[in-house]
Each structure stands twice: as structure tokens, then as C-alpha cells.
Image (tube, grey):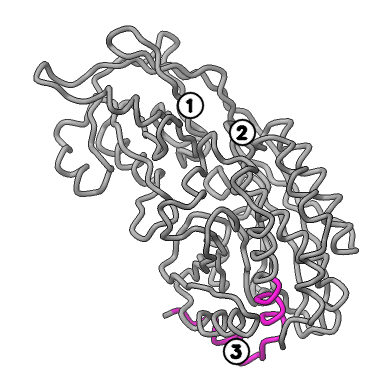
Amino acid sequence: MQLPSDVPGRIAADHLFPEEFAAICDFGGRLAGTESERRAMEYVAQRGALASGVPCTKIPVSYGGWRAQRAELHLADGTAALCHPLVRSMPTPAEGLTAEVIDVGRGTPEEFEAHRREIAGRIVLVRHELMFVAGTIHRRRKYNMAREAGAVGFLIAGPVAGALVTGSSGRNEGDAGIPAAGITPETAARLVRTAQGWPQATLVIAAEEYPAQTSTLLFDLPGRSDELIVLSAHVDGHDVNESAMDNASGVATALAVTRAVAPYVRNWRRGVRLAFFSAEEWALTGSARYVAGLSEEDRRRIALNLNLDTVAGGKRLTALTSGFANLEPFLLQAAEISGHKLRCVRPLQTNSDHANFALAGIPALRLVAGYDEPDANVRFVLTPGDCRDKVTADDLINAAQLTAALLVAACNASPAESEQWRHQG
């Protein structure tokens, strides 16, 4: 089934679309556990109900809360350098952690292996890579390699000149860990080894852990059968920016698409479940709890998860198809029929909420902008530059129109087609 002819125009003319995007940015970075996140979740619950025409179902999500109280980095010459603690970083001793810094470059497995005998007892320095590029090694993997090699601390330098970087350490509540912080590339350049030896630095991180709770927000629009397409986006972000691309763009797009298609869903083969997660930036905790709580029957009902995360900030949109090879021809055809270009990238990438659906055997994809575009604005994600000025109205409209086309096609695919999606290549 093709996209209803009036839907693209309704999306383009939707004055609420840019208003909601701006409102979500206005709440600030929306770090899980902050007032910024709480207010944003309340707003999204209200806007989701208006967009869908159905009441919001809130599922409580308990998780290990964490908040930073202090973060400092002092170099050997006594100067202070900018730093930002990674989410769920372990604290240092009150007086700080003073140790030599070993720069292992990009932080590949080969580089860690080459320096393995030198890492123990030192602070490891690596580089944060552009996330939406083939072959990227995720920050959490580098952190774990450093910890396993005996490092006492972890520093990661951002990819943008003058800008520090943030993100999650990936450490779960109760896990062992090491103090970890993001720094600027200029600071990394000052931490080079010389003929006198490894440079020394003092890292100070004060943080506390506490029981925390957020919510998953669900809005169900039934179709003719009990099957569903889950359209999802995460609301939370980081406190160094507005988290505009990652992920106010996905949240606002999901709302706009739902508003445009809601009148039609009752006549489609499958219904739509609009889902908003939080604590995504905490190693995908919100969606992990949600998927883990599904019964086998609930999982069977979900034919596809269409996850929107960072859908603005680049020239092109890519579907990360999580290893579901048979899903790709369907997506490409739906995009082509609607006049959109789409690239599919197959290997499972555990960089957003779609991964938890995929790991549970549910066909899932992440729609993302700027993949393999090193100069795209998405390079500012997780830096202070992830603000609304990096997103254009055309970015949002294009993402919403393509999302609507994929959603309509998925809701009306034949049972034989949807069954094929579940067979991974």
C-alpha cells in the first residue's frame, strides 16, 4: 500500500512539527534523572496523546541513577583542562587520581594489544570517532578494553576542534569500573609522550549513585489485526547541549508522523505503537527493560521496530537493518515508490534502541542521518554543538515523509512479507 496522497503535504504544512522540535530543545539536554528530562517526558506524554488521539500508557522504569558533582582535569604543569565525566563514571578519590597517561591512539583492539604491557596502572587516552561511519569502534568498547587491561582511568578526546565530548561509559549499576571523562582534541595533544616519558595528569570526578525511575511512554493505534509496528524514539540526551539532533529530531518526527497517519491506521493490516524511551544514553536501559518485559506473544505481535534516532543533520538517511537482510528490499522499494533515497547498512549496530528489539529476534532498524558523511552536522553529536542550529526544517520534513512511507508500507505488508523479515541473512 502506498502512502496516502495527502500525508506528505500534511507533514510539510504541520506548524506543530517545528514548534514541538523547538520545545523539546528548550528543555535542555534532558540527561536522565534531571529536571530537564522529567519536564520533557511530561511534555512528550501530552503531545503524544494529542498526536495519536489515544491516552498515554506509562510504564515505570527503574534504573541505577547517577549524577556528577565535580569534574576536573589538571595537567602536569599545573594548568586545568576542560573535561566532562562520562555517564556512570566511577568517582576518583577525593584528592583525585594522579597517574601517567598512555595515548593508544584511536583505541582499536590492535592498538590496545600492542600497548597491553604498558596500560596497567595508567590512564588510557583514546579518540572518540565519528559514530555514523562504517567500522567505527564504539566508545563503550574502548572503555571496556582499557578497564580489562588494568587502566586506572579513561580519557576520550572528541572529534571536533575546541569541543569536549560526552557519552556513556556503558557501566551498569554495580559493575566494576574506572573514572572516565571526555576531553577536547587540544587537551589530548598536550598529553603526548616525550623523551622524558609518559605525561602525568590528575583527574578528579565526584559522583553519586542512587535508585532512579523514569518511564516508557506508549500510545497504541489499533489496526485490523493484533500485529503492531513499533515507531520509537528516545527522549533523553546529555547535559552539555540541547540534544537537538540526538534526539529531539527523532521525537518530533515521530510525533509529526503519528499526527499525519492517525486517521488511517484503523483500516490498515497492522496497528502502530508509538513508543518513547528514556535512559537510552545509559546503555539503552529504557528499551532493554521494555523488551525484557514482553511475553513471547507480545514479541510475536511486533512485526517491526522502526526506530528514529538522529534523523536530521546530514544529507542522506540510512536504515541500519540489524542483520535482517530480507527487510532491505522491502524498505528500498517503499522508499523508492515514495520518491525518497535510502541506503541500507546491514551489520547489527548496538547504538540505539532498535538493538534491543533485534537482539530479541524482532526485526528492527534505526533510521539515521549523516551515515558515512564525515562533514555532516551529525559530527557534533555528543559535543556542545548538538543544538537546534544544526537542524533545518527540510531535514525534519524529509525524515518524516520517508518515515511515514516506511510505516505505511510496513503496516500493510502481507503476512508472507513480514514473516520473511524475521529471517536474518
In this figure, which residue is indicated by the disc labeled 1? 84
Reply above or below: 158 against 9.
Answer: above
Quarter of the image containing the C terminus? bottom left
Q: Position of residue 10 (x, y in %)?
A: 82, 69
Image disc number at residue 65: 2
Magenta stretch encompasses residue 282: no
Reply above or below: 122 against 260.
Answer: above
The residue sitting at 53% across, 73% down in the picture is 342
Is any part of residue 298 visible from this angle? no
Q: Secondary structure at mark 2?
A: strand
Which of the two discs, 3 and 1, sits closer to the camera? 1
Q: CA distance from mark 3 to mark 1?
A: 47 Å
What span is colored magenta in the figure? Answer: 404-424
Amino acid identity at mark 1: His
Report crowding for label 3: few under 14, some 14 to 19, many 20 or more residues within 10 A (C-alpha). Answer: some
The residue sitting at 82% across, 43% down in the picture is 42
Amino acid identity at mark 3: Glu
In this figure, which residue is indicated by the disc labeled 3? 417
Q: Quadrant of residue 164?
A: top left
Q: Position of residue 379 (x, y in %)?
A: 46, 47
Q: CA distance from mark 2 to mark 3?
A: 42 Å
Q: Mark 2 or 3 closer to N-term?
A: 2
